[in-house]
Image (cartoon, grey):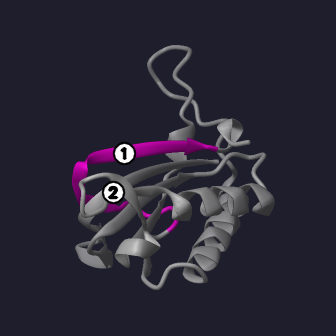
Amino acid sequence: MRFVIQRVKHASVTIDGEITGKISQGFLVLIGIADTDTEEVADRMIKKMTGLRIFEDGNGKTNLSLADVDGALLLVSQFTLYADCKKGNRPSFIKAGGPEMANAMYKYIVSKCKNIVAMVQTGSFGADMKVELLNDGPFTILLDSDELC
């Protein structure tokens, strides 16, 4: 599982000209799901993401978490995070989870996050989405479940 976490001042997702998800300060999280991912992996990733202390305190140090700043989440599924570009110029997505499994896992992640964070917005799994954001910093972190203890 891979999360690309961007600390944002604001972010939104638009589908067919309609805004389907919109947040102010918080994290825009692009979520890639592999065919080997489980709910246990998702739980570890969610715990790590929501606990990250990457917002600035009064001294300008990154000491505050999402909860400390009453931040929101915008969760967007993105299978392209599992692009394999080793051969040729056309990426392979063979390591990405199949649509049925990945959608179920995405829904699980959204549900779990809603139990932790007051404001959770989403894109729509498999849709052609337009994502807009104002990255704060810029501050972007890649969490990869293969690298978590």
Bounds of the magenta segment: 125-144
Horizontal placement of 96 versus 122: left or right? right
What residue is disc 2 on? 7
- Pick whichever, 24 or 137, lies toward us: 137
* Residue 86: percent from left, percent from top: 56, 16
Dot 2: few (<14), some (14–19), or many (≥20) neighbours within 10 Å? many
- Pick whichever, 100 or 45, lies toward us: 45
Q: Are marks 2 and 1 in contact (CB under 8 Å)?
A: yes
Horizontal placement of 114 versus 74: left or right? right
Dot 1: few (<14), some (14–19), or many (≥20) neighbours within 10 Å? some
Q: Is residue 123 above or below residue 54?
A: below
- Pick whichever, 80 or 54, lies toward us: 54
Task: Work out whether residue 77 can be spotted.
Answer: yes
What residue is disc 1 on? 140
* Residue most extreme to the front: 59
Instruction: Tell me which residue sits at (41%, 73%) in the image.
Output: 68
Disc 2 marks which amino acid?
Arg
Q: Is residue 66 magenta?
A: no
- Examine the image and state in which quarter residue 109 appears: bottom right
* Residue 15: percent from left, percent from top: 32, 70
Instruction: Tell me which residue sits at (62%, 79%) in the image.
Output: 111
Give the mark nearest the N terminus, 2 or 1.
2
Q: Between marks 2 and 1, how big is the CA–CA gap? A: 6 Å
